[in-house]
Amino acid sequence: MDGVMDNPFERFGIAPIFDIDEPHLAETFRRLQRVVHPDRHAGGSEQERQRSVEQAAAVNEAFRTLRDPVRRARCLLALRGVDTQEGVRTFRDPVFLMDQMELRARLEEAREAPDPLGLLSEVKEVLQKRRVALIGEVSGFLRQDTPESLGQAAERVRRLGFFERIAEEANLLEERLTDCLPRGGMD
Amino acid sequence: MSYSTKVIDHYENPRNVGSFDKADQDVGTGMVGAPACGDVMKLQIKVNAAGVIEDARFKTYGCGSAIASSSLLTEWVKGKTLQEATEIKNTQIAEELALPPVKIHCSVLAEDAIKAAIADYQAKKAVQ
Amino acid sequence: MALLQIVEPGQTTAPHQHRLAVGIDLGTTNSLVATVRSGVAETLPDATGSHLLPSVVRYFADQAPIVGQEARDHAGEDPLNTIASIKRLMGRGRCDVRRTGNHLPYAFAGCEEGMAILKTAAGEVSPVEVSAEVLKVLKERAESALGGELVGVVITVPAYFDDAQRQATKDAAYLAGLKVLRLLNEPTAAAVAYGLDRGSEGIHAIYDLGGGTFDISILHLHQGVFEVMSTGGDSALGGDDMDHAVAEWILAESGIAPSADQQRVRQVIEMARIAKERLTVDEAVPLRLDLPDGTVWTETLHRSTFDALIDPLIARTLHACQRALRDADVTASEVKNVVLVGGATRVPRVRKKVADLFGHEPISDLDPDRVVALGAAIQANILVGNKPDDEMLLLDVIPLSLGIETMGGLVEKVIPRNTTIPVARSQDFTTFKDGQSAMVIRVLQGERELVRDCRSLARFELRGIPPLVAGAARIRVTFQVDADGLLNVSAQELSTGIRSSVQVKPSYGLTEAEIERMLRDSMDHAREDVDARNLREQQVDADRVLDSLAHALVADAALLSQSERVVIDEAVAELASVRRGTDHRAIHAAREHLERVSQAFAARRMNRSIQQVLTGHRLTEFSEGQ
């Protein structure tokens, strides 16, 4: 693969900053895929088609990174040499973790409550607010671009990791709550 | 192959789920989290005047291995001194539960949790 | 520059000649073939005027199989040799057969663990071969209607088909002598046929309930770009199941034991199917059955009873719809249009329930039986090069997560579901023994954490790992899913750069060797037919490359230096020359040579186009190749 193009910002020809023009990003994505997508190279040689698959996959990957604020932030931090260390560092902020436990407990309670879907949607609203606020902080820290502020940004990204997990739990719960199928159908 | 029977046992019949009052002078609270998988663990110990852990409680949100690791740890620390509890290694937990490689970090989190609880208790005592 | 002026049959200097391509809907109940003629997509009928070809194959001990309506008409008499709904067994194992109960009342061979294999009067056949028989008929129909050989075909598959099911479809096409340009997801094909992208930007849902499969796709459409946001469904749920629900009711009401002889059961199922179709128009339908004891059983089936029988099935589809909406992060009210596809959507109860969920009336102006084939034909027409300026782009997704087995019976997800394809992800592995030269990676598809709850796809055996101390090797395994939704695994040891060879052992499919053998076996005059087929393939491939290159040279000759151009022209002349002959190996070699010498040119063109997108203006100077 084209080694230098592992930088998604370069692949899309945009400046490596957090606040990006999203419509422009989507438009660039469509234009790039129109050039590289395998459907455009169905008549080519084996090598050309393989190259097309690789390029299209790389464009898809870059778009995935750039369009999601959390992934974009991780990428920017990595480009600046800051590893968010999510795989290794145990998170210890007690206030934050307490809040996490409370939110998870609320999800558990929602299941038994008289209006589970209502409670669930309340929790989802809270999650969304927290996430948006954290992303705002990340944006600010990245813009300052000092070693301390980048460290802060990385810490906020670690927090966002927890919110991603709760969001998954909330979705799973919603699926279970809306699952009103009679068991033992045709299979 | 599946989760080991011990993991399943701790997952289905967890021991010592619950809480102590954080403000209680004899209680040490450790809160830790793993950002990569979003696991959150709270582990609390109640320590007597002789420095022995009388009782322990935990609350964990996470996968089966995380719950089992913290459940097992609360069992193990009961009756141990703070020093002995500090010496528990995650590898012992992992071995006891036969955790597969991808789940070893759950035992690390449990080890971090007990150390945090001990540190919290000791900080309280230092202030007194 | 005069070297390209030779005009030969099969070789063209006019890159915009119309090439024969078709779209095929290989359905559970019926199959169709369609093409674009004079700018219009249309399905092709057989000699009697029927557009639908029942996907039924009847095998005999002493003659070639019969396909279609004639086979279906005699299903009741010869149930074990008349194979219908084979789509349900594509890419499936013997163990899956049991789960379908009496839906597939055939005789099976083979072991528990492997692919499902049927025992017929003509011997043992795999689902791939049965499907190939259907495809052969469609191929003949198309070539006779269009007066020439097909250059390529787009075949549709349910969006929810996994890798094994897709590979089986491609294998069937290969056996039938068809060149597959793309496997296209059925809901996406329908969206193309409806031309939903031509309206204003929006989010659309395609609800596709066929004979044996259900798909729901949520797409974002904007000016020719179809971006699938999420897809869901059930590859074992369809109109057939409605027939079976009614059949079970009939058997129960009439007192016939479910274990009655196969003929009777097939007849009851057929009766149920007709009743279902009648109830689309009528409120009640009279039933009449001759019982084994000589009496006659009569009953009236009311629509309300029918609705109650099928409601649990519809509920399953709606559940999948809700999950797809959640995965796409859109609400039902944000969906602009919901389109109905597939014969089973004619059932009024289905339409009502779908309208209830999405909050407005669904669209179904195009014939729900034909719309998928039409969409496939439109894409085939573009892929084969008949419309070089068409901006249509289909960005589809992988429907099920791909993962690998790790120690402890756990699945580690490598590519999550609803990831846009093509996609490539890498994982690094190491050895645990000194000098270890091989490694097995087991790939599964599914959402669950444990291996036993997911579908096993294949074992990938990596060989040729260079001998190193245990733990020293860094083997990067790349999982690549292409635009057809098919997985390709490659591996490279990073410290030495040595690439491992990868052998694929599919769990429920055929190896390459097995397919080649089947191909040879299917030819009566083996030797000559194989040679003739090879020759045709090489000629078609050669034409394709010559066409494509001619077009490229017209557009971008400026990207080549004089000396580079001479090399390419020579290779073109060489290929054009051997193409006139009958030596398929020589054609193959000349084509490979041409592809090699023009590879840098192709890469340069792509890079230049990419740069144009990024900088937004035309570059007139040519840049050095990579």
Image: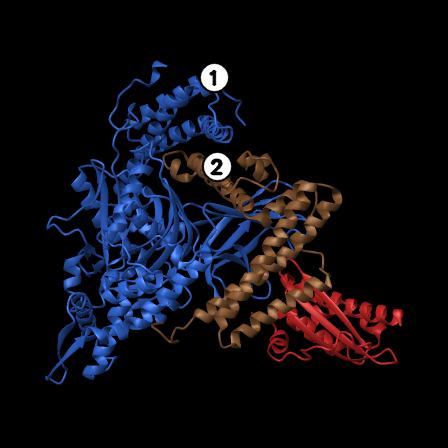
* Chain whose colour in the figure is brown: A
Disc 2 marks which amino acid?
Thr
Q: Residue beneath label 1, please?
A: C561
Q: Residue at x 48, y 69 (%)?
A: A117
Q: Which percent across, then down, holds residue C547?
A: 33, 28
Give the quarter of the image for residue C581: top left
Viewer can see residue C152? no
Q: Residue at x 72, y 48 (%)?
A: A151
At label 2, counting other C-alpha atoms closer than 10 Å, the crowd grade (few under 14, some 14-19, many 20 or more) is some
Give the quarter of the image for residue C553: top left
Q: Residue beneath label 2, please?
A: A28
Q: Which percent across, then down, holds residue C88?
A: 32, 62
| Quadrant location of the C terminus of chain C in the rendered image | top right
| Quadrant location of the N terminus of chain C in the rendered image | top left
Disc 2, SS? helix
Disc 1 marks which amino acid?
Ser
Which residue occupies the foreground of this view, C391 or C527? C391
**Color of chain B here?**
red
Which residue occupies the foreground of this view, C94 or C608? C608
Q: Which percent across, then down, holds residue A157?
A: 65, 52
* Chain whose colour in the figure is blue: C
The residue marked by circle 2 belongs to what chain? Answer: A
Judge left or right: residue C352 versus residue B104.
left
- In this picture, is C622 found above or below A97? above
- In this picture, is C374 found above or below C343? above
Judge left or right: residue C171 versus residue C47.
right
Q: CA distance from mark 2 to mark 1?
A: 31 Å
The residue marked by circle 1 belongs to what chain? Answer: C
- In this picture, is C530 found above or below B118? above
